[in-house]
Image (cartoon, rainbow, N blue to C red):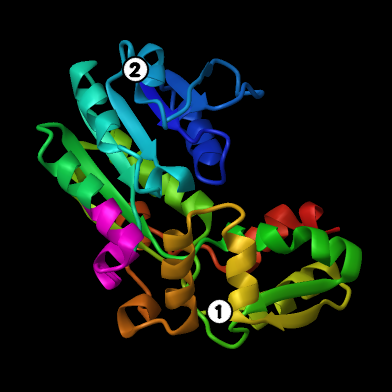
Amino acid sequence: MIVVTGATGNVGRPLTQALAEAGEQVTAVSRHAVAMPDGVRHVAADLAEPTSLTPALDGAKALFLLLSGDLHAPEARPTDIIDLAAASGVRRVVLLSSQGVATRPLGPSRVAMRAVEDALRGSGLDWAVVRPGGFASNAFAWAESVRTQATVAAPFGDVGVPVIDPADIAEVAAACLLDDRHTGGVYELTGPEVITPRQQAEVIAAVLGSPVRFHELTRDEAKATMTQFVPVELADDTLDIISAPNPAELRISPDVERVLGRAPRPFSDWVARNIAAFR
């Protein structure tokens, strides 16, 4: 049995589906009960309280660990989840980390994530780490303004990074959970092209078949919005990257193709699959 945390999110949902379609027994973990694919067990748990995961981990062989924004807060202890998994008999953990662990190792949220990676390496469990860059699904933040005002508002409109489709992250994570060849692997995941927020707005407009205006936010305006959902440290680290990506953050990684045998999906594919959110 494989446990998927964050099972209702942009990565966890397609990962749960992929594992179920592969014939695996899956336990999906989220804070609140939601509809799941046939045959998938759901357990409500809050990773901020690691012991709440105990029922989900009973009988599990593997765990996909996704740490939500609040688990980057200074008082959080996400390494307790790894200890609990080991004590529960889990043999393999695949951690969703961040590209910034390698490219911005001194950022506060990256230091915290590096500590989780190091704890996993020292746990005695089989492990793999996936380190995505920016998510294509961050564009969901624009859905309401596109629907109501035909506008995308974002900072640093002409600064791009190679955003990754969460479905590709999910497929790589599934491979790491199911295939021993990926034990000990660290995979940096990016999309196939550098794309700016202004260009993303143009893609959304093209798929919608109607104009979408781009409005550039200041850094302070963007931070004010982000800190409604994530800790200040994580917001600052993210804004540092998207304002001035370094060469490592602009690099198109080969790792999606190495694992899946195909190129990563472009942003336009993500938009086409999710265009209903913008109509």
- Would residue 109 be counted in the magenta stretch? yes
Q: Secondary structure at mark 1?
A: loop
Numbered disc 2: secondary structure: helix
In the image, residue 44 lies at what x, y percent?
A: 53, 20
> Up-down: is 211 above or below 179?
below
Q: Which mark is residue 247?
A: none
Q: Main secondary structure of the magenta part?
A: helix
**Does residue 93 appear to the left or right of 28 in the view shown?**
left
Mark 2 = which residue? 57
Q: Is residue 121 visible?
A: yes
Disc 1 to disc 2, C-alpha distance: 39 Å
Residue 146 appears left or right of 200 = right
The tag earlier along the polypeptide, 1 or 2, is 2
Query: What residue span does the magenta drawing correspond to?
Result: 100-114
- Percent position of residue 43, x then y: 50, 17
Quadrant for the N terminus in the image = top left
Percent x, y of residue 176? 29, 41
Q: Which residue is mark 1?
A: 195
Q: Can you tell which of label 1 and label 2 is closer to the viewer?
A: 2
Farthest residue in the front direction? 75
Residue for point 13% across, 34% down? 123
On the image, which quarter does residue 99 sit in?
bottom left
Q: Is residue 68 visible?
A: no
Dot 1: few (<14), some (14–19), or many (≥20) neighbours within 10 Å? some
